[in-house]
Image (cartoon, grey):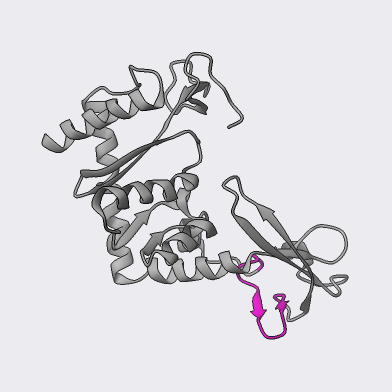
Amino acid sequence: RNSYSKTDPDATFMRMKEDHMLNGQLKPAYNLQISTQQQFILNYSLHQTSTDYQTLAPHLDQYEALYAQKPEAVVADAGYGSDENYEILKEKCIEAYIKYNTFDKEQKEGIKPFSNDHLYYNEQGNFLVCPIGQRMTHIGDHQRKTKTGYMQTVSAYQAQNCQGCPMRGVCHKASGNRIVEVNHKLRRSKQQARERLNTEQGIKYRKQRPVDVEPVFAHLKANRGFKRFLLKGINKAEVEIGLLSIAHNLK
């Protein structure tokens, strides 16, 4: 972690949604994750990172340790959509009904014809085709590591001649020929996620998720008045949220 709190060394500074100054102050916090079914809390975990996608793997591991089995499916919003998480669920044989960051926008506006995901890819020849039919040749690959240590392979492709193209203004505005970077593994995962989320079961899950997990947070924060931890240290904070989860399920 790259943040440290003197009042609670276990906590990480995160930007709070609720703040009396209304200026988005950073405060020491924990990222609470819960799994629910019919508004019952099945699993909870606290994390020292502000990004949700990094919490899915340890949260699933804890679920498996508790119940000695894997869930049949995982439904989550776009904050959890990453190639690492798609790969983890695929390896565990768990159906992933997880949005990616542009899914909702695509449903409303469609996939933009000039976006990287829309460009036709010839796998055998390893080249892309731009909207006017020009071949974009492969110019190299590079790897990058995520915060969790997951290695991603990104391929770069360049158009041969963008000069004088009538689509240039809407395609790209940089000088020279257009260069795009594509993570093919993520692209395939997003395509599979798109198809799965638009099935009858996927639509059902998408409608169910916000009325299943979100009311639980509403009950804890608004109805029970639990808006901050009373104890310091991640172990004590886990006890707090554990007691609240038991009370919630009994109620």
Q: Main secondary structure of the magenta part?
A: loop
Which residue is pictured at 33% across the width and 29% down the height?
A: 238
Horizontal side, residue 209 vs residue 138: left or right = left
Q: Position of residue 8 (x, y in %)?
A: 47, 18
Instruction: Residue 48: say if magenta.
Output: no
- In the picture, the quarter occupied by the C terminus is top left
Q: Quick one: 124 or 93, which is closer to the camera?
A: 93
Segment colored magenta: 114-131
In the rendered view, tell whether residue 126 sits above or below residue 175: below
Q: Residue 58 location, x and y as percent? A: 42, 46
Which quadrant of the structure image shows residue 169? bottom right
> Is 94 positioned to the left or the right of 48 in the image?
left
Image vertical order of residue 167 relative to residue 40, above or below: below
The residue at 39%/18% (across/down) is: 232
Residue pictured at 47% horizontal, 24% vertical: 10
Rendered location of residue 63, percent (x, y): 31, 49
